[in-house]
Amino acid sequence: MATYFLKRLALALVTLWILSLIVFFAGQVLPGDPGRAILGNLAAQSSVRALDHQLGVDRPLLTQYWSWLSGLVRGDFGQSYQFRAPVRPFLGAALVNSLKLAALAFIVVVPLGIFGGVVAALTVGRGTDRIISVTGLSAATVPEFVSGIVVIVIFGVWLKVLPVSASAGTGASVASQLDHLILPVIPLVFVLFGYIARMARAGTIEALDSDYARTATLKGLKRSVVIRRHVLRNALLPTITVIATQTGYLIGGLVVVETLFNYQGIGNLIYKAALAKDFPMLEAGVLIIGVVYLVATLMADVLYTVLNPRLRLGISG
Amino acid sequence: MTNIAAPPAAGVAVARAERSGDLTPWRLLLRRPTFLAGAAILLFWVACAAFGRSIAPHDPLAQQLLATNSAPSGAHWFGTDQLGRDAFSRVIVGVRDILLISSLATVLGTVLGTALGLIMGYLGGVADILVGRIVEAVLALPLVIVAFLFVVALGPSPLVITIVVGFVFTPLIARTVRSAVLVESQLDYLSSARLLGEKSPYIMAVEILPNVVPTILVEFTVRLGYAIFTVATLSFLGFGVQPPTPDWGSDIAHNYVTLGAGYWWMTLFPALAIASLVIAINLVTDSIEQVLAS
């Protein structure tokens, strides 16, 4: 067990390091000179050069990468070009906002997705199953801004029952904050529902087909008892892993949803940093998303192992 | 379309289909209403992509400054936008770039991913571990963000978007192909091929590849849906097809500020167009999967 987790942790660290390389060098491909981007076209070449020197972007690439990486390890995310201030406080505040949105989406979608998947599995091959499966697949591939526009038009413009902006303003009550988050959550739920339902369906079908489910049925248990006590327990295990890996997709969706609903989260922060060519902010934001994803995956692995008696006791197969 | 459906005929599917009453996968597909519905919508959009300019009732770029922001009517079925351009014509013509870019990107990703997957799955060893780590690192980021990062870096042009989306999909497709190849590697015909002294590239291309074609076909259609997702999203974020070229994503991005004023038609119709395209592809994908699995 312990060796397994250490191995997983080491692999995650290697992945994180490769990720930092990708993010850093993708940032270097960006055309244009940061000093020029900040000072504008009219600034003198000498002041651009002076600012580049001050920002440290005139040093060799490897030196820059090293100082960036060692800064990150110490918790120093660098200075934002657009705000001329440390990146960290911006990231922190945005991350908290995004987590609120993401948590609400998960609270809605996890039970819904599992329920949909189990219902589909119990009616496998029949109409209900096909409807749930095709709807789930379609909802997962309709871009968030498309479903976002549809719900804005219906609930915000036609019915006028819900606010179309996600920000309730500072000091708003929890109820008002929730009210503003209802519409933004819907596109995220749409995208995630398909994945979770698909996994729950596959897991349930496999468990229904198993020897222990057959034994339970043959010894005379009612179908509902077989499903509740024997099938679901085993079926939902793989679903947990999927839910964790969906964190990454969820955050990808946040970029779009937060832009559409003008919500000050990490996605919006990255988007605005990209528009402003604010590399330190962009790189730090993208890396944070990678870290969140890797931590979620690692936690899913741990949870999976803890919940699975075969793995917990080290019995193979 | 026949060509797309034909390859699995070489594999397992046809043997099964013949047993179940002399039906080729193609004919099985044609019997499925979901496939027919999906294919019909898809054909409609392909026709619009090819002949959009002649089908559209108005010039999608013509501005009528006296008829801006007008609601849907007999003259303008989907209304007009902030510059008085006909929204219906823009939806009809706007399918071309997104469909072309997404298809080319998916082809690129499938070709590269298949090659990589064959190498990883068949040769294994250091190549497998090394590529596996890189794949994992890329997958740690939401695809939209990776694509976004590179398109921002390289500048939005149809070529850049195609290449970036194709590259981003490569590891995903490679992973799927790799697992299919691993299953094949266990089978006897590969040991025979090796004993016959066939070279690895020959074995990969001639022995394994035809047997993993059904997997690749399903993966291709699934990825096509995601390619449209990604390309549309990039457009919406302002890093896709550039104005004034009609494009669903960028039209929504430019008009959604007017939702506050109640002008819903400029954004709702392109949004529904994207949804219909994606759903059509999913109906086709699901039918192909069902037929191959039956």
Image (cartoon, coloured by chain):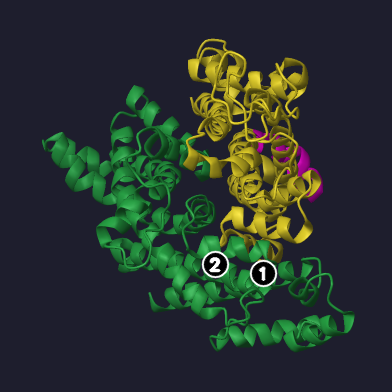
Chain colours: A green, B yellow
Q: The magenta stretch spans which residues? A: B193-213
**At label 1, which amino acid type do we have?**
Val
Q: Nearer the viewer, residue B107 or A78?
A: A78
**Relative to residue A89, is residue B64 drawn left or right?**
right
Q: Earlier in the sequence, mark 2 or mark 1?
A: 1
Labelled pair 2, 1 in contact (Cβ < 8 Å): yes
Disc sitting over residue A23 in the figure: 1
Can residue B197 be spotted in the picture? Answer: no
- Camera-nearest residue between A282 and B75: B75
Q: Secondary structure at mark 1?
A: helix
Look at mark 2 in the image and give the residue it sits on. Answer: A290
Q: Secondary structure at mark 2?
A: helix
Q: Give how far apart the Cα atoms at labels 2 and 1 are.
A: 10 Å
Between A95 and A157, the one nearer to me in the picture:
A157
Q: Image quarter for residue B59?
A: top right
Image mark 2: chain:
A
